[in-house]
Structure formats: C-alpha cells, structure tokens
Image (cartoon, rainbow, N blue to C red):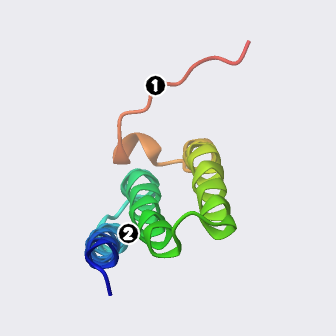
Amino acid sequence: MTMLEWVRFVLAALFMIAGLIVLLGATVGLFRFKYVLNRVHVTAASDTFGVLLTFISLMLIFGLSISSLKLLLVIVFLWLANPVASHLVAHIEIATNPDIDKECEVIRHDDR
C-alpha cells in the first residue's frame, strides 16, 4: 500500500468510528429520554450527523466512483427527509397527547 492509501484508510477509519459513536449516542438517548419530543430531538440531529460521518468514511474507501455519488445522494435525501419526518412526529405528538402541557411547554397557534 502506498502512503496515500494509508492516509485514506486512516481517515476512513476515523470517520467511521466517529459516526458509530454519534449513532451510539443517539441510540442511548432514544432509550434514556422519557418523552417523545425529547427522543425526537436527540435522534433527529444525531442520526443525520452519524450517517453523514459514516457515509463520508465509505466515500473515502470507494474513492471517486458511482458508489460515492450514490452515497452523496442518500445523504442529501436524508438531510431533506429527516427534518420533515421529525416535524411530523412532533406535530402528531402535540395533537394527540392530552398531557402534553405536563411534559413540556407548548405554544398553540390557532389554525385560521
């Protein structure tokens, strides 16, 4: 292996480890927090960042190829879809939970 390949390998390993640590933190937060809105908050940011780091690692391993482009498109899709899904889960929780005022501060807007 050349020096450039070793550098790519080390960088890919560091990105992979960092991504897995972030995803592990999101998983721990998912089981640790009690309320749905807290769970949504911790997983919404953490899983996107963890997947980003993991996919950057895979992109470094694959180099410039069609597989790297596909991984980049998956990252873009996750960055677009994750906030929307998190917002919908939070909106449904606020709309259906009768004890939401006991769990957190909610500002209700009149639908006009």
What x and y, as percent, mark residue 47? 44, 62
**Residue 23 occupies which quadrant of the picture?**
bottom left
Question: Dot 1, crowdedness within 10 Å: few (<14), some or many (≥20)?
Answer: few
Answer above or below: position of 74 versus 109: below
Instruction: Tell me the mark number nearer the camera, choosing from 2 and 1.
Output: 2
Question: Is 35 on the left or on the right of 78, as rendered?
Answer: left
The residue at 60%/41% (across/down) is 91
Quadrant where the image shows the C terminus: top right
Mark earlier in primary sequence (2, 1): 2
The residue at 30%/66% (across/down) is 22
Q: Nearer the viewer, residue 79 or 58?
A: 58
Circles 2 and 1: CB atoms closer than 8 Å = no
Residue at which label 1 appears: 107
What x and y, as percent, mark residue 28? 30, 74
Which type of secondary structure does the marked residue at label 2 adopt?
helix
Q: Nearer the viewer, residue 57 or 111?
A: 57
Disc 1 marks a residue whose amino acid type is Ile
The residue at 46%/75% (across/down) is 61
Which type of secondary structure does the marked residue at label 1 adopt?
loop
Residue at which label 2 appears: 30
Answer above or below: position of 97 versus 24: above
Quadrant where the image shows the N terminus: bottom left
Mark number displayed over residue 55 = none
What x and y, as percent, mark residue 68? 59, 64
What x and y, as percent, mark residue 69? 65, 59
